[in-house]
Image: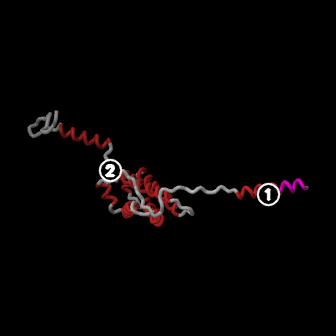
């Protein structure tokens, strides 16, 4: 009985000692603070093609999303955390109100990426221990992904190789039509040999 009691006390002391030596959290070196402004390193801003611009100009969710994403670059970490819920709602609206003329698997996947990034930003903003580096990185990703979204919108209006070949064929057919004298010109003015 003494051995069991001794063993019990000994195991109790060891477990108490282990609880005392909890690993201390290391101080994480952060590159940014919540008072810093977001610095986005987008290499190139995408300008929408006229056909895409015409469609999105009447799409309220797109206009709102573009304005908010553009303003992210001048916001502090604290401001980004404050608007994270709004950004998430805007991206949900962008996804759910997409015009049928823009619906394609590629464009829809881009809206999914934007919505996911907005959700991640919102989750990071509501964590108990917030990390400004994570928040700035996710906000920058959101800006970059919006540029990719615009690029994808432009790709809907690019001519496919098939369309390009048809245009070349039509131009060739037109060049084979006889002129007013009834002859088929081999060369036209300005053609190079």
Closest to the observer, 182 or 156? 156
Q: Residue at x 51, y 56 (%)?
A: 30
Residue 39 is marked as none
The picture places residue 10, in percent across and down from the top left corner, at: 81, 55
Q: Quadrant of residue 26?
A: bottom right
| Left or right, 184 with reference to 42 | left
Front residue (pair 11, 75) = 11
Crowd around label 2: few <14 · some 14–19 · many ≥20 (10 Å): some
Q: Is residue 57 visible?
A: yes
Helix or strand or loop: what does disc 1 sit on? Answer: helix
Question: Where 159 sits versus 47, above or below?
Answer: above
Label 2 SS: loop
Q: How many marks?
A: 2
Apparent side of residue 1 relative to residue 69 in the rendered image (left or right): right
Range of residues picked out in magenta: 2-8
Q: Which residue is mark 2?
A: 157
Magenta-colored stretch includes residue 64: no
Task: Please name the residue that numbered disc 1 is placed on.
Answer: 12
Q: Kindly identify the residue that appears in the image at 41 percent across and 63 percent down.
A: 75
Could you tell me residue 170's position as x and y percent?
23, 41
**Viewer-nearest of discs 2 and 1:** 1
Q: Quadrant of residue 101?
A: bottom left
170 above or below 88? Answer: above
- Give the side of residue 135 with respect to residue 22, left or right: left
Q: Are marks 2 and 1 in contact (CB under 8 Å)?
A: no
Q: Is residue 184 visible?
A: no
Residue farthest to the left, as pictured? 181
The x, y position of residue 182, in whole percent, is: 10, 37
Quarter of the C terminus within the rendering: top left
Judge by depth and name the residue closer to the eye, 140 or 61: 140
Per the model, the C-alpha gap separating discs 2 and 1 is 73 Å
Q: Main secondary structure of the magenta part?
A: helix
């Amino acid at each position: 009985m003494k051995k069991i009691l001794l063993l019990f006390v000994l195991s109790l002391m060891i477990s108490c000692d282990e609880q005392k030596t909890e690993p201390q959290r290391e101080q994480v070196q952060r590159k940014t603070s919540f008072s810093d402004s977001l610095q986005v390193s987008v290499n190139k801003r995408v300008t929408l093609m006229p056909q895409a611009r015409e469609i999105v100009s009447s799409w309220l969710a797109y206009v709102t999303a573009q304005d908010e994403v553009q303003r992210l670059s001048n916001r502090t970490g604290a401001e980004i955390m404050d608007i994270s819920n709004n950004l998430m709602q805007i991206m949900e609206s962008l996804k759910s109100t997409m015009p049928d003329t823009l619906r394609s698997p590629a464009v829809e996947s881009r809206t999914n990426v934007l919505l996911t990034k907005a959700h991640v930003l919102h989750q990071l903003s509501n964590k108990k221990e917030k990390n400004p580096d994570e928040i700035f990185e996710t906000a920058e990703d959101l800006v970059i992904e919006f540029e990719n979204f615009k690029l994808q919108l432009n790709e809907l209006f690019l001519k496919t190789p098939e369309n390009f070949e048809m245009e070349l064929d039509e131009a060739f057919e037109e060049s084979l039509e006889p002129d007013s004298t009834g002859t088929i010109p081999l060369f036209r003015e300005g053609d190079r040999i």
